[in-house]
Amino acid sequence: MAEQPYIGRKEKAPDRVAFVSGRAHFSSDFAFEGQLHAHIIRSPHAAAKIRSVDLSGALKVSGVKIAIDGAGAAEHLDPIPHHIDPIVFGGRTTDLFCLAQDHTRYFGEPVAVVVATDKRTAQYAASRVVVDYEPTASVTDADLALKDDAPLVVLGWDDNSIMQVPFCGGDAEAAFKDADHIVKTQVRVHRQATQPIETRTYNAIWDEGGQSITLYASAQNPHPMRFALAKTLRMPENRLRVIAPSMGGAFGLKMHSHPEEALICLLAKLTKGAVKWTENREECLLIGGREQTHDIEFALREDGRILAIRDHFLANAGAPGATPGWGMAFLTGLTMPGPYDVGNLDVWANIVVTNKPPWSACRGFGKEITALALELCMDKAARELGLDPVEIRNRNFISSNDFPKKTATGLIYDSGDYAGALAKTVESIGYYDVKRNQEKWRGEGKYIGVGLGYEVTPEGGALPGTMVAGYDTSTVKVDPGGSVTILTGVTDPGGGNRIGIAQIVADELGVAIEAIRVLQGDTQTCPYGFGNYSGRSLIVGGGSAALAAQDIKEKIVKVAAALMEVEEGSIKIYRGVVTSSAKPESELSFNEVCYAAYTRAYDVAACIEQPLEATRTFKPGLISHLPDEQGKINPYPSYSNAAYAAVCEIDPGTGVVKLLKFAVTHDCGKAINPVLVEGQACGAVAFGIGGMMGEEIVFDEGGRQKTRNFEDYVMPRAADVPEIVMKHHDSPNPVTFMGLKGAGEAGVGGSAAAVVNAVNDALAHLGVEINDLPVTAPRIWSAIQKAQSAQKAAES
Amino acid sequence: MSLRVQYARPLNVDQTVALLGELSSGAVIIAGGQELMPFINYGRVSPSVLVDISGLKDLQNIETSDDGLSIGALTVHRDIQINPLINEIAPLLAHAALQIGGGRQVHNQGTIGGNIVAMHPLYDIIPALLVLDAEIEITSQQGSRIVSMADLINESNHKMGTHAVLTRVLIGNSPAGQGWGYEKLKITDGCYGSANAAATVCLAEDGQVQSVRLAIGAVTEKILNLSEDLATFLPASPDADLDSRIAGIVESAVEQPLSDQQGHGEYRRAMAGVVARKAFHQALDMARQDMALRERM
């Protein structure tokens, strides 16, 4: 293996300052000649018939170029292809259009659009569009949506379920019969939203000469988005170019098949111009996820060993949407039983549609909810059996000797040392100090608790028959001057994976990292790729770039050997200097060799095929799409995992939670750049904390969304996130490049569980246990009040 | 909604009020813009004319006289936080301004006048001004008049109409030995308050609580001014009985509590009592320390 001066180093991205100071170019920064702006008119009702749409008032406004409604758009647009069609997994499907026609299914659904010469004119003209709605019965609660008399969200379906799907294995029923203890709880996870600092933007430019569209988009998956656009717009993919410039966060929100994408392209085509739409915060908050209710039970042996897990859960996925949102609930089931060695599984997901706005992908993609449900129930089991939460986990973890491990749902875990990671976290957080002092502190009126969470996050996913691919492709080009360009199919949501890819290639080629430039997010220049999701970018982007770099290095070594008249095996390239052990007195620069490779194709470089360019694909192993005898598949090559712990103090008079300390021990297989890994991990912790302590989307009785801005959707600030002690505990993945497991997605559920378990630990002596989330101060205060009045009633 | 906004930048208060007198109700004053701009950006208000008073130097100064402080309406939160005169004469106000959310950008931009005319139940300035018994100077073409903060909050449209401008905030000198407290309860750092309380306390020579002024914000649509309610049982000993009386008065004054994502109604009512007690005790402790210092001298 080549020497690795860069891999493992905290290398800094050269464009980081431009990026965080807003001087990098984000989608919304691009403006073109005659730039037009779109304003979308959205449904104010959760469910309504649309009797008519009168656009005439808007069209009279000076500066308005076009206004169309659902019927108008349908003349030009086909349905949006589902990012993941439920029908592929045996569920119900329906055609989804960019603008509602005849009826609207959710508050905020796009109904019409106005394009004008400036944003304000478009907004003003939109206020003059008259839509005649006849509100109809709506349902926003998943339980109610399953009642016989519930209004149907999708006309023509038999009921409001997308699918009921089992994730079963072994004989759970028998295990529950034999159990010494059965511990059950209901974990209610509330609706949350991902809120990147940069909301979505689409800016489409029509090229009359090429009869083509260029779309600048905040897009995680430019190539698959182009495929979907082509279908919807009835255009061939080669007439569409998607460019994803710098992105200010994505978190799954910018995975494609949102209705605005093709709509904005159509408007550019119809106006023969450039049309831009930038989502405002209120619109961004409409897109949600994570709302699931788990009735979860463990069958336990006396010693705390779990014999079986039963979890029948309901997912409130909102109205059907073409983005991959609904699939999150599927993944929640598939990821059971997380890190635990439990073969008897009775898990059923019922994925329900309601008249809330559709889900879209949220970081964790349902896998975080697996962790929440399991970890909250695990702490309840520990309390009921009188076991320490560390001990009960250790008794149930999959042993590090058991990998690769096939789970009851058919996943094949690559590697890990769960007990080892937990031990490091327990040490970092000072777990036993808290436990030792807890009683004393309670006597002083200080309610301090410590909570654990473990999360296994399948990464690098590949779903058969969808654009969620497990592989990706990179091109590496070395110029005659010796500079290196990497074009890769994976995109950067803002975390900076390009510096990690550059580190890998710098080490493979033996060049200085400054010689490398990574280009991403352009369907015209980058190889066909699937973009960013599922913690895949370094696994497959870095892996494929490494393979391509190896191919080029082979050529460069040949040319160098010819130039130096030595054996190829004696050549070494290190930081741009080429030497040979056979001729220690002479050396060449990497650049000289590259120049010779291009310019001496008929003498010293006759031994290679020019140019110094290679395109390679990395297809990780372990993925298996051929169903086993039970019909189960393994869609993931890689199972990153981490142990989390939180310490909190609660003010019993107000319910306010103060987090005092946080600890993470992370297994991402191998950290190419610890800054990238730790940045992602810290972000996940903040995400988990925010989701449990402030972020909640609520609706009024009529199904209208009440949470519309950051006044109500309160994300964590620096002061809410305590010191985070971060450790690594890497078990390399045997089937990926250098053992990578992915680091970008994991951690939201594990950290959320640690927070909730810490809160419940702090209040355990009062008999308070909150598994109905979030654990905000008013809920905690109410729970304390309730426990105290119950206690008083018992005493009297 | 009007599409084209006209913009006026009067040079002094006289020009401002003359202009406001001529314009229709579609004219809106803009100073720091912290309240108005989000509304405009979301299309919730659409003024026909923006009257920009941010350049009026007369309204940016902080003056003292024998009567106390006179603060120009355009004084930004940051200046209120750090101004030595305000910190000397009305430290409670400086402290309350420090509790304003939004960070340094907002503090450097938002004005005391804008904060008051917003009449927002969650904002921090009015409770402090109520317990400081502040007065507000309002100027129109008819001239200037002085209204007490306590009267102002009882009026819809803050007694100003669309033709007047809030020009100054007047705060009298505090009685010697007065202690003050301000308690804001936030459920996370980024939240608006779920309840906040401003209090002042004066002690008699014998240590009895002679007077308490108390205002509660963020709990009801209208900020609660409870100073008169408390006066009925003063003077009183600063004991547990007084604590529970204060909490009782506060909680019963909360008739229709706000209920939003900062907390449900029952929580808000209970938290009103909690912050009231904390602010009262901060003020009481300060008054006692002051008394102890004076006795030592």
Image (spheres, coloured by chain):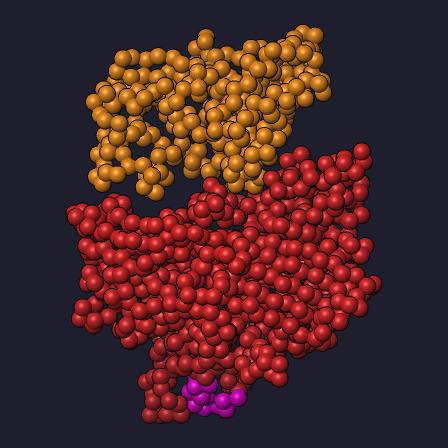
Q: Identify whether A142 is placed above or below B196.
A: below
| Residue occupying image coordinates x 72% and y 68% | A308
Question: What is the magenta range?
Answer: A553-569
B59 horizontally vs A514: left or right: left
Q: Residue sitting at 65 percent across and 59 percent down? A: A295
Q: Is residue B43 left or right of residue A64?
A: right
Residue B168 in the image: state x and y as whole percent. Answer: 38, 18
The chain painted red is: A
Q: Nearer the viewer, residue B172 or B246?
A: B246
Rendered position, A572 above or below A51: below
Q: Residue at x 60, y 44 (%)?
A: A776
Q: Total of numbered circles in the picture?
A: 0
User: Could one spot residue B227 in this view of the protein?
Assistant: yes
A134 with respect to A507 (left or right): left
Q: Main secondary structure of the magenta part?
A: helix
- Verify whether residue A236 appears in magenta: no
Q: Quadrant of the N terminus of chain B?
A: top left
**Chain identity for the colour orange used in the image:** B
The extreme right residue here reads: A302
Front residue of this view, candidates B68 and A184:
A184
